[in-house]
Amino acid sequence: MRATTIHAPGDIRLSDVPDPALSAPTDAIVKVVAGAICGSDLWPYRGAKAITSGATVGHECVGVVEEIGGEVRDFRPGDFVIVPFVHCDNTCAHCRAGVQSACVNAGHTRSGQGEYAVVTQADGSLVKTRGVPHADLVPSLLTLTDVMATGWHAAVSAGVRPGSTAVVVGDGAVGLCAVIAAARMGAEKVVVLSRHEPRQQLARAFGATHVVADRGDAAISAVEEITDGIGADAVLECVGTAEALTTARRAARPGAIVGYVGAGHGVEMPVRPMFEKNVGLVGGMAPVRRYLPDLLDLVLEGAIDPGRVFDLTLPLDKVAEGYRAMHERRAIKVLLQP
Amino acid sequence: MRATTIHAPGDIRLSDVPDPALSAPTDAIVKVVAGAICGSDLWPYRGAKAITSGATVGHECVGVVEEIGGEVRDFRPGDFVIVPFVHCDNTCAHCRAGVQSACVNAGHTRSGQGEYAVVTQADGSLVKTRGVPHADLVPSLLTLTDVMATGWHAAVSAGVRPGSTAVVVGDGAVGLCAVIAAARMGAEKVVVLSRHEPRQQLARAFGATHVVADRGDAAISAVEEITDGIGADAVLECVGTAEALTTARRAARPGAIVGYVGAGHGVEMPVRPMFEKNVGLVGGMAPVRRYLPDLLDLVLEGAIDPGRVFDLTLPLDKVAEGYRAMHERRAIKVLLQP
């Protein structure tokens, strides 16, 4: 099959690789209808994370079940499915506690930017739609595999409550989805830190009531002004760098939680300033499967439209251009069509 | 008056200092009935925190109101009062949100190891007993000024729930009080990490069901065995060193919260291992005043007896010996009688 492979920083190719095969009776193979490039794919692309040269990449996709292992009970070929980027059995103690991203049988989508992807623990991982969804819905369904669920996790982790003020740090696809989540959970003020005009516009369309284009001290001053000097009730940190985490911590009012979903490679948080303000840090890798059924309902009933984060759609053979566009911030998020 | 002063690491003296005076109409002066040495007093004593030579020390005391400022309404001379180590107006936005330790008018007890202490924001800070309590109750009341409320804050921050497994890192007075809190909140298993026999005994008396005398990897293995490989539902970190925070993070099950109340001077937490497990870090300087009324009721009805952490009582002029005893871990906690 054709699938995207990475060979070195900046070196993305569409390659011919062996067709995927079932390796366990709980596996399924999904024919990809749409895949996506994730902000976290840029870490290895930019040389910030180790690369296995020639490895297939892409952990976000939706598609149609092509083949199932002998123990798969709940899906059959032809089902249209949403594939969480972390696969899970949805029965272990961690899954039952709602932390499916820590499933004892966790697996990962590895060729979402290709023609086919293997899903381990198919019964536990996949969620299907009734029938094949209209093409207009595919982008929003695709966000449920990662970024929408991740933005939602930031809001859940931060404890966004009705009537509160939520600050979203980050205007990437996850940050924009976090705006959707905060607004949906009833935050009265949703403040997004963004200096990019198209992202600001989309944030407002998603429910942001305030846009702060500053960074550092100036951003904190702006948040203080918006919150009458008190600070944010909840902060949703959707970047994962030390600078962003520091801004998030400083924007929080005493006693507030920074819900964080950025990967945080090599980042350390100084404990003392958190201690003095009683600012907590809660979050991590999103348990996508936990939120997926509810988010699917919201998409299907038209309550949320996160698919608008895709501002560039390319055929799969243009994947390298898709990476360049995201790397250069010319695109918020890229949808790939095999 | 006579009050404890610090002059250099290891140099603690009982000195003659000017009598305290009201400096604002919201102040009160309390004649100290009992003061205490806190684990955090050992930071400067051990040279781990800057010292202002000759400064009075001691932030834990109970006593009798001696004098009040013109705007103090709720207290009068003769009232027996418990003095939270952070004073607060109990009316500002942070106080109303339950984070009295971040009060916009916060003050601190500065001569609790002396004959008199000034309390700023007396109406907001102090809690009084009905009449003068029996001497037997004084040690427990004294713990409410800091360590019992701080252990309680660890348990609240960690989200201890009925039937859960709580791991307490630290067997100092705060850790032991955290055991009381976890047991009181209904944890089915309360695991304390302690290698000191007298502290282990007291922890068991306070409700610990398991004592783990190991550290590092061996401690984590022990916790895994106790929790069937799942990890702790809640971790109460009551030390504040990098080693203790690391142990706490590792002991937590995915999705659990480390409730931390150690001061964390210079400590940094790596974000990535928290991210992978969805382990949160919540807590900080305890909002003592928030918990004080409820904890007072528990003490008065005999439901908790945290005063047992005081295993050495000394007259005030033996304060230097008290510091030595705590520094050398010969005493868990020292009560001082002016």
Image (cartoon, coloured by chain):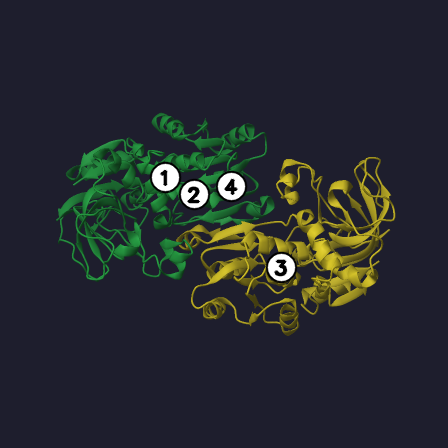
Chain colours: A green, B yellow
Going by the numbered disc 1, the residue's amino acid type is: Val
Distance between mark 4 and mark 2 Cα atoms = 14 Å
Q: Is residue B131 left or right of residue B303?
A: right
Question: From the viewer's perspective, is the residue at label 4 or at label 2 nearer?
Answer: 2
- Residue name at image x 35 percent, y 59 percent: A91
Front residue of B174 and A134: A134
Please check whether the numbered discs 4 and 2 fall on a single chain: yes
Q: Is residue B108 left or right of residue A64?
A: right
Distance between mark 3 and mark 4 Cα atoms = 28 Å
Q: Is residue A108 left or right of residue A230?
A: left
* Image marks 4 and 2: residues in contact by CB distance under 8 Å: no
On what subunit does the disc labeled 2 rest?
A
Going by the numbered disc 3, the residue's amino acid type is: Ala
Residue identifier under label 1:
A174
Please check whether the numbered discs 3 and 2 fall on a single chain: no
Residue identifier under label 4:
A249
Residue identifier under label 3:
B181
Residue identifier under label 2:
A154
- Residue name at image x 78 percent, y 55 percent: B113
On what subunit does the disc labeled 4 rest?
A
